[in-house]
Every structure is written in C-alpha cells, then in structure tokens.
C-alpha cells in the first residue's frame, strides 16, 4: 500500500494510508531519510502502526522546513505589522527557485496599508514573474482567489513570524490553530513547532510549519547560483555566460534596470546586490 507522511512530531511520523492515519515505523535504512510529504510503500502492522518499507521518488524537497513533493509555496508577507522586508522575501524566493518549487506571493494585511503601497509591491513582483495576491483575514479580501490558487495542491506557507500565515490557514481550512501575537517591536512571536500536512476541505494539503521565518541565504545558495535565481534576469542576455550582473561590460541585466514593465525593477536589483554581498561577492 502507498502512504503519505502527513506529520512529524518529535521522532514520530504520521502516515495516511487509505484514509486512516498510523504511526510509521521506518526500516533502519530509511530512518532520518523520510520527511513530511513523502510517499512511501507501507505495510499495516496493527491498528496503530505501519511499517515503512520503501521511499518513493520525490519531485522536490524543501531544505527548511524539510517538506517533500510540494506543489506550491505560498510566500506570505504582511504589508504592515510587521512591515514588508523585501530582502527576506527575495531570499525565500531565490531558495524556492533553486529547489524547483513554484511560488505565489501573498501580500497580507492589505487593510492596514494604503492602496498605492499594495499596488507598488504587487507591480514589483508581478513584473518579476510571480503571481501576487493581496489578502486580509479581517475584510476577506483576496481569500477566494487564494483558495482557488491552492485547491487540490500540496502547499507550504512560508514567511516571517507575524505575517499572518496561521490566520490564513485557519480561515481557509476552518481549523483553529494557535496564532502568534505581535510583540511590542512589531515582530511576530514564533508559535508553530511541528510539521503537519492539514487536509483542506477543498482538496489538497496545507503545511502548517515555521517555514523560512528567518533566512540566512548563505546556508542555502551559493554565489554562482544566485544570478539564475532572480527569474526576471533570465529575460536578458549578457556578453559573458558567467556574468554576475554587478559590473561586467555587456551585462543585459544592468542595461535593463528600470521601473517600466518588463525591466528589472531597481528594488529587486537592490536586494540582489545585497544578497550577493552576503554571499561574499564584493559590490
């Protein structure tokens, strides 16, 4: 029988097999190699346990959190409380690009921001090649669009603490997960500790996890990889195949920085330079 790993709580793995959930007992060679989202060949041992015999091929594996076979990463950042951090956002998007996971940018708490602020950020990320949804749990704005985008998929929500990930899960799935409060400095307090795939009433799974609450880009990406992880850069050719897009003559990216549609937006190029600096490339 084929099972899906739907939770990890400490050392325990929850396995869904034919609409029932068991505790998984992996064979010795599989211990430490199975993660939430994995598909496994399982054999029922008793009413509570299944033996995990084989790990089936996976299409991707996120590095943090360790979640396999992700169809879509919903990257949630609040516009206010806490204010959007584009450097953090672009770090997450680059890591997801590296691991072959499609991203949807959710700009949450639109009710707290001026409309022009939302439109500015929406333009920057749509221009970069991402789908963007503005949401508000308080007013309901964008929730139907988001629900339609994730229907039937295995979805991971990523982003900083306090951005509203858990509140979005609650309103989309009807669950009542614990929501963190915003501290007095405007930063969210981390509350989610375990990794769980929650079955959505409209089909698919939503992963409740502390996904990318903090990111140090150098732990996930090397300097030579980053130029290929800003997807809008790929529209333009450069004289040198190993162009860093920082100072080389004949760089198509530098020649196409601008605020018009189709160009490399200055804000995205700013975060690119900062991330390259973090990766040890002088600018």
Image: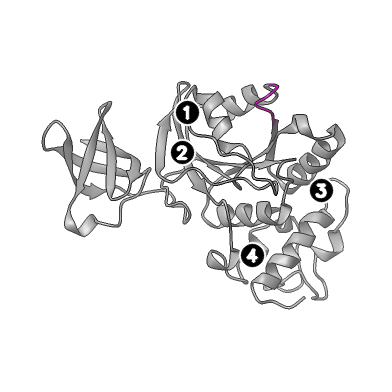
Which tag, 3 or 2, sits closer to the chain's start? 2
Seen at 33% across and 45% down, the residue is 9
Circle 1: element type: loop
Tell me which corner region of the image, top left, top right, bottom left or bottom right, holds residue 109: top right
Give the Cα distance between marks 3 and 1: 32 Å
Which tag, 4 or 3, sits closer to the chain's start? 4
Residue at mark 2: 207
Indicate which disc residue 262 carries. 3
- Give the camera-side residue of 176 and 77: 176
- Residue 138 is one of the magenta-drawn residues: yes
Which tag, 4 or 1, sits closer to the chain's start? 1
Q: Within 10 angstroms of label 2, few (less than 14), some, or many (20 or more) residues?
A: many
Tell me which corner region of the image, top left, top right, bottom left or bottom right, holds residue 77: top right
Q: Are marks 3 and 2 in contact (CB under 8 Å)?
A: no
Seen at 73% across and 66% down, the residue is 274
Which tag, 2 or 1, sits closer to the chain's start? 1
Circle 3: element type: loop
Q: Is residue 141 visible?
A: yes
Circle 4: element type: helix
- Give the camera-side residue of 83 and 254: 83
Give the Cα distance between marks 4 and 2: 27 Å
Residue at mark 4: 226
Give the Cα distance between marks 4 and 3: 20 Å
Q: Nearer the viewer, mark 3 or mark 2?
A: 2
Give the Cα distance between marks 3 and 2: 33 Å
Q: Magenta region's main secondary structure?
A: loop
């Amino acid at each position: 029988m084929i099972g899906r790993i739907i939770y990890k709580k400490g050392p325990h793995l929850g396995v869904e097999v034919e609409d029932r959930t068991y505790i998984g007992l992996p064979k010795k060679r599989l211990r430490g190699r199975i993660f939430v989202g994995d598909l496994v060949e399982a054999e029922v041992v008793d009413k509570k346990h299944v033996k995990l015999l084989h790990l089936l091929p996976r299409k991707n594996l996120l590095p943090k959190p360790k979640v396999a076979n992700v169809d879509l990463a919903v990257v949630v950042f609040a516009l206010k409380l806490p204010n959007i951090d584009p450097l953090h956002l672009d770090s997450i998007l680059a890591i997801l690009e590296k691991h072959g996971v499609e991203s949807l940018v959710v700009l949450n708490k639109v009710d707290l921001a001026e409309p022009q602020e939302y439109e500015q950020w929406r333009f920057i990320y749509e221009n970069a090649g991402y789908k963007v949804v503005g949401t508000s749990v308080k007013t309901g704005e964008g929730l139907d669009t988001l629900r339609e985008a994730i229907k039937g998929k295995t979805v991971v929500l990523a982003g900083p603490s306090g951005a509203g990930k858990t509140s979005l899960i609650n309103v989309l799935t009807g669950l009542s997960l614990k929501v963190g409060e915003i501290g007095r400095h405007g930063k969210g307090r981390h509350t989610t500790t375990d990794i769980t795939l929650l079955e959505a009433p409209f089909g698919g799974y939503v992963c409740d996890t502390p996904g990318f609450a903090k990111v140090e880009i150098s732990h996930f990406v090397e300097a030579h990889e980053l130029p290929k992880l800003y997807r809008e850069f790929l529209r333009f050719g450069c004289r040198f195949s190993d162009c860093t897009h920082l100072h080389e003559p004949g760089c198509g990216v530098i020649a196409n920085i601008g605020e018009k549609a189709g160009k490399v937006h200055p804000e995205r190029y700013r975060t690119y330079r900062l991330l390259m600096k973090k990766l040890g490339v002088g600018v």
